[in-house]
Amino acid sequence: MRQGYQSWVFSTKPVIAAAAAIGGPFEAQGPLAEDFDTLHGHLMIGQDSWEKAERVLLEEACDKAIEKASLTKEQIQFMLAGDLMNQSISANFSARTLAIPFLGIFGACSTSMEGLAMAAQLVDSQAADYVLAATSSHNAAAEKQYRYPTEYGSQKPPTAQWTVTGAGAAVVAHQGSGPRIQSATIGRIVDMGMSDPFNMGAAMAPAALATLEAHFRDLQLPHDHYDLVVTGDLGKVGHSILSELLPKHNVHIPLERYVDCGMLIYGDNPKVWSGGSGCGCCATVTYGHLLRRMTAGEWKRMLVVATGALLSPISYQQGESIPCIAHAVAIEAEQL
Amino acid sequence: MADEKKKMLTPVQQEYQELAKRHEPPRPLVRNFTRAFLVGGVICLIGQALQEMFIRYFNFTEKTAGNPTVAVLILLSALLTGLGLYDRIAQWAGAGTSVPVTGFANSIASAAIDHRSEGFVLGVGGNMFRLAGSVIMFGVASAFVIGLIKTLIKMGG
């Protein structure tokens, strides 16, 4: 049910029956390695192209999530998935393999929460009993499409981010046990005229702010309602910008409760510059690390704000600025 | 150009961009310049050594030794690209590896490797000059203009 201008409150509180996170070799060396369901030792994952490797990641995440929910894929009524590749080939081709009725979505790196919010809405409105929401990204495939060839020698600035090789999937169910989806806020596009594709954290931070403002306004919640507020892939640069913007705009989230997936996934590794990014960043950290810690009882309420930079290599070359979006999903532990 | 773009921004956008600028970690320019100078210099030193070798042991003259020297550097660069090492050296060295001929070879080899999955004709053939193409195009065009100027000056003198 809609509340306020742009938020949904789910009265049935759909359940995240199961979630899965698959990662690549670089993620395996990170501090969150333990929280992945499967980690691959090579970027190619036994395929003959990066694009096929990404598809395998996504298929594995979907299979794993369905298996962990003790369901079969015939029981999943709809699949919502998207990725960063042109024409969403990873999602489309995975849906071909899985043969589940499919809606393709694109929200760049915000796809994870876009999918989860829509899945919760479908379940809450009784349009489905089980919905699968999934997304993926692959470092080399994204570099090849958005930037330079993977082996091209160019020096990246300290504001650049490292695209995560990984996929995450969640099965949203009308009943069962698991963390519950309480509400969601759909973001507006925010464009602050930033045009540097090597500084996406700074481009996306205002979109995260706008969605957070809208969320607390629509739901009329106190700013310290959540034990954890987490953004998708703002990185160190975006995290520090948002930390300054929040109090400035009278959103007094306790800053020690605010973290960013892009900073969590690789820790302090200087090789990734500002932090991780890509659809897989928010998806693997949320579905792997954060949900596990929530189930372990570390926090009861969290708000995940997935941020997306909606640029294309063509729009960038034509001198356009980067439109950004953020979608927030509030998740509660099973036992409050 | 940059100023022209700035004028089209709203005051809110301008204010935000100033705020964002403050949070941007500065590029380590002195370190980048030093590394670029050292690595670029070392590559040129290797080139010089190769040239001396071709002159001394293979009977090339100073004029003709240039071609085999460049060929060897290109070969080394392509090899390092294929082994996945060139991009790592470049992240460290910056302009030091992109300005010499090795950077040019790297741009072609890396594009060819990336697009191998789309086949030899449309993939490798169609994409290997994706980055190097503009260097060749503007290189040829500017060489033509310079050549024209030189000829005109000669005719006048």
Image: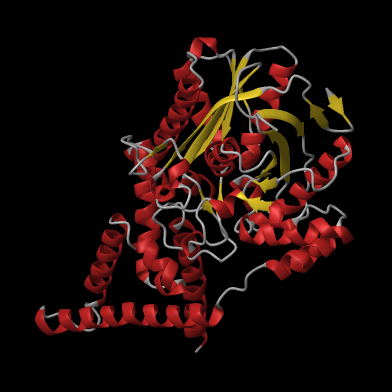
Q: Can residue A195 be seen from the camera position used here?
A: no
Q: Residue at x 50, y 80 (%)?
A: B31
Q: Position of residue A188 (x, y in %)?
A: 79, 40
Q: Nearer the viewer, residue A283 or A99?
A: A283
From the viewer's side, name the closer residue of A226 and A219.
A226
| In this picture, residue A221 sits left or right of residue A271 | right
Report the number of numbered marks.
Answer: 0
Q: Residue at x 69, y 33 (%)?
A: A332
B63 displayed left or right of A53 = left
- Check the image and report above or below for A218 versus B23: above
Residue B20 drawn above or below residue A178: below
Relative image position of residue B36 (x, y in whole percent): 44, 78
Residue closest to the far top: A74
Quadrant holding the N terminus of chain A:
top right
With respect to residue B40, does A47 lie above or below? above
| Whole-percent x, y for residue A146 in the image | 54, 48
Q: Residue at x 65, y 29 (%)?
A: A334
Position of B132 relative to A297 (above/below): below
Image quarter (top left, top right, bottom left or bottom right) of the C terminus of chain A: top right
> Is residue A233 shown to the viewer in this render?
yes
Question: What residue is rendered at 73% in x and 46% in y?
Answer: A323
How are the colours assigned in the image? secondary structure
Q: Quadrant of residue A37?
A: top left
Q: Position of residue A48 (x, y in %)?
A: 32, 36
Q: Nearer the viewer, residue B13 or A268?
A: A268
